[in-house]
Image: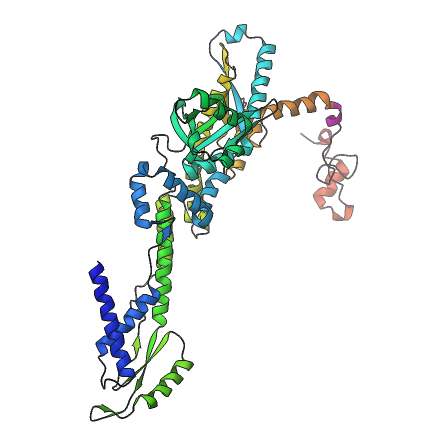
Amino acid sequence: MKNTKEYLEKIYETDKKAFDDFISSKTPTMDFSSLKRLVLSELTLKNSVHPTRILGFTRKQILNMCQYPERYGKQIIKLMNYMYQKSGYVRRIIDYFSNMAKANYYVDTEFLNPSAFTQIKSDVLKKNYMKFCAQTSKFDMSNNINTIINQMYLHDIVYAYVVETDTDISYYFLDPQYCELGGLVNGNVYQFAINKSLLSNSYFESLPNGLQQLIETSCHTSLNNMVDVPYENSFCIKYHNNFLHLFPPFFPMIADVLLIDEYKDLSKTKAINDAYKLLVLKIPTKDGKLTMDDPIISPFIQTALQVVQENIGVLPYPDSVDSVEFSSTNSDDRDKVSDAINWTFAETGVSESLMSGATSGSELKLSITNDSGDIFRIYRMIENWISLQMKLRGFIYKSYRFVYHLLDITIFNQQDVVDSELKLAQASIPNKQRVCAAIGMNPSAMLGNITMEQVVFRDVFDLMQPLRSSYTISGSEEAGRPESDIEDLSASGEASKENNTNDPDNRIS
């Protein structure tokens, strides 16, 4: 490789010297093959397309990471964080999935044995149900669901330290490079540990007080650098739950984004080369010898160079030469950048129309429906984590149990879900909680609103009446529309008025 590079550089220098010798009249003739090589070399050096690198990695290396992700855990996370900040394609597709989620939940009651119908006291059941709903409300998933899903698509996993007070629950999301995944705990819920040896002082000080105390205490109890986070204080779910190494779902997209950039560079280079031309100034000759020397030719060349654009070269030559252009003559040229963008979204399985591409409305709707199924799968993981947390907090009963459910709803299908649940409610299906969940009202809010409207402020709400308009009230105290004037009546209308046949008692049967 080194010898080849040196050989090409030597040829370039030889061709350049031959051209300079001809311009300076040191040689009477010019080798046109040398000129051709020189022009092509100049274009190549000026407009060469170098492989795009991201954090030092080429597209080929990133494809190798896709093939062996278990070897490049931290590098993969760094690349995803970088691309999420720098690439509009990666950011838009991750934000599209994370922002569509809505954590609208309800609580089902399941009876576990027949004795529940006879032995359970309604007051006790009501009290336990309200406690369960109050606790689930503290988890505040509606305000954290988008961040959780964003972390899953960005890192393949979510690590969070859970802090609970008497009034609420907070989530402190941790950087994956400091954490290590443990085993499965409950369904899709994982246990994790923090590697304290990797923590910098500034990062340690940014951690919540409870986690700082846990890490400091482990210095005396842990034989290694790993600090296990207790189940009741940990939140850890993983997008790809069929293997333990980290592999974000859209990481392969980075290689395709690099391909788009390379095609953009190639398109730019092609446009420059297509516009490049060579202007040939014929030098008169006699008996094969030049009749003008360099002092006479140079002013003409300099004048030509001053009036032409940078992409036009000027060449003095002693013979007739056809016009030299570098534009493509291929009639099948296509927009390779657009093709690369189409390939990128085809590989990710997401409709390009979501990112301002043009396509049919029916295709777009089907694509959103398919993407929503991926979000619903994450809902099930969160339900498993909530179930574990409620069990750890003692919400376990022999005859019945309360089950936390996230409604299969997104910002795209919310109205469809509301309409569907209302139809089921009209058919006497006991789904009033689901109807309230569809409009964003959790069970605790539903119970509170019903109590305020039907008990506490019932006298106030009874005073509420529909707004008055011509559609809700008549123009007079009598029912029916106003009578028509006599001159507007037809013959049958006059007979009806005289006989008062509108009164059923006056009609002839």
Give the vertical position of 273 relative to 88 (above or below).
below
**Residue in the picture at 38% in, 63% down:** 268
The residue positioned 51% from the left and 27% from the top of the image is 211
- The colour scheme used to paint the residues is rainbow
Residue visible at 57% across and 25% down in the picture:
138
Q: Position of residue 385 (x, y in %)?
A: 46, 24
Rendered position, 258 above or below 270: above
For residue 151: magenta?
Answer: no
As drawn, is 331 to the left or to the right of 173? Answer: left
| Coordinates of residue 4 in the picture (x, y in percent) | 21, 62
Residue at coordinates 75% horizontally, 23% vertically from top-left? 459
**Residue in front for this viewpoint, 330 or 293:** 293
Residue 295, can we see it?
Answer: yes
Which of the 4 image quadrants contains residue 474?
Answer: top right
Q: Position of residue 313 (x, y in %)?
A: 34, 77
Q: In the rendered image, which quarter contains the C terminus?
A: top right
Q: Magenta stretch containing residue 462, yes or no?
A: yes
Can you name the residue that lies furthest to the right here? 477
Region of the chain picked out in magenta, as a range: 459-473
Picture layout, residue 132 above or below residue 375: above
Q: Which quadrant is home to the N terminus?
A: bottom left
Q: Is 300 drawn above or below residue 313 in the view shown?
A: below
Is 388 on the left-hand or right-hand side of 470?
left
